[in-house]
Image: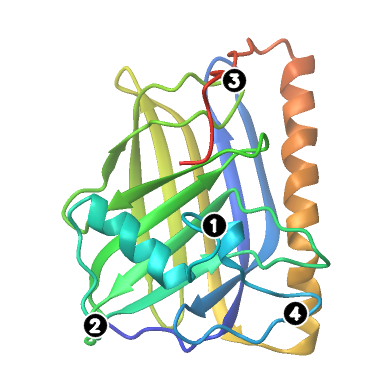
């Protein structure tokens, strides 16, 4: 496998399609960072990567936290494996990542496993471990106020030199009810793209709330959030 050089900024598009009970679709251009957890870019005002923004103990490194989570699911990280992260950076003190993806790659570039970390707008987060031979994951976390915590995610990941993509379908009762995807092309980090990527956390948080309001105005039934939800 030919793996992109890091750090890189991935210019692409995000698309969401909601199929039931009302159809709603959007697509917009965006940017994400692809970084190596063993060689993170230096902290910048417009781009920093910190353990507190992701899974695990904020006092430990991102690599240590991902390794520990994978181990709880029976997945190993060998000493020569690489861990790459696709995510938004903290910008001007703020970050929001609906989804961060961590790829564990062998020295030959083969995918050993991946961690998908989901954040919702209520401050909760939850991580799933996906293996190359099993792309279906049971939904365990409240994300949208318009979907129950039921069903399964079908996940498709692609990481190569010219294209990165993440596609997730939510299936409930045998029906594909929701799809989300990101597809982009990695490029070397430049000042212009750093500034463009710095706006993304603000853009994403605003759009999520705007689309939520729109669906609420269309009288989409609201699913109450579990009171025991937290950071896991």
**Mark nearer the viewer, 3 or 2:** 2
Closest to the observer: 214 or 151?
Answer: 151
Snapshot quadrant of residue 41: bottom right
Label drawn at residue 54: 1
96 lies left or right of 33: right
Depth check, front residue: 174 or 209? 209
Residue that appears at 75% across and 46% down = 205
Q: Residue at x 79, y 25 (%)?
A: 213
How far apart in space, not on screen, are marks 3 and 4 (Cα)?
34 Å
Q: Mark 3 points at which residue?
A: 146
The numbered dot on residue 79 is: 2
* Percent of width and height locating residue 73: 23, 50
The residue shown at (72%, 22%) is 215
**What's the CA distance linking mark 1 and mark 4?**
20 Å
Q: Does label 4 or label 2 sit earlier along the sequence?
A: 2
Q: Quarter holding the N terminus?
A: bottom left
Q: Is residue 10 above or below residue 67?
A: below
Q: Distance between the residues labelled 4 and 2?
A: 31 Å
* Separation (CA) of disc 3 from disc 2: 42 Å
Graded by Cα atoms within 10 Å as few (under 14), some (14 to 19) or many (20 or more), the crowding at tag 2 reads: few
Task: Give above or below for 221 relative to 81.
Answer: above
Q: Residue 194 carries which label?
A: 4
Q: How far apart are the two marked residues, 3 and 1, measured between alpha carbons? A: 25 Å
Q: Nearer the viewer, residue 214 or 8?
A: 8
């Amino acid at each position: 496998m030919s793996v992109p050089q890091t750090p890189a900024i991935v210019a692409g598009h995000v698309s969401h399609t909601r199929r039931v009970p009302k159809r709603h679709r959007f697509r917009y251009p965006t940017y994400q960072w692809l970084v190596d957890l063993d060689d993170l870019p230096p902290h910048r005002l417009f781009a920093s990567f910190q353990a507190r923004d992701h899974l695990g103990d904020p006092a430990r490194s991102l690599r240590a936290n991902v390794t520990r989570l994978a181990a709880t699911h029976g997945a190993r990280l060998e000493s020569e494996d690489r861990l790459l992260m696709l995510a938004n950076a903290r910008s001007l003190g703020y970050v929001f990542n609906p989804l961060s993806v961590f790829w564990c790659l062998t020295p030959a570039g083969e995918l050993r496993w991946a961690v998908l970390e989901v954040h919702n707008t209520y401050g909760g987060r939850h991580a799933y471990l996906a293996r190359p031979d099993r792309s279906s994951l049971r939904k365990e976390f409240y994300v949208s106020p318009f979907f129950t915590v039921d069903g399964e995610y079908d996940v498709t990941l692609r990481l190569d030199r010219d294209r990165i993509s993440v596609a997730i379908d939510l299936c409930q009762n045998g029906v594909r009810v929701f799809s989300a995807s990101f597809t982009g092309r990695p490029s070397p980090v430049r000042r212009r793209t750093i500034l463009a990527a710095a706006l993304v956390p603000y853009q994403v948080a605003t759009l999520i709330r705007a689309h939520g309001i729109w669906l609420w105005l269309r009288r989409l039934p609201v699913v109450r959030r579990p009171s025991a939800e937290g950071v896991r």
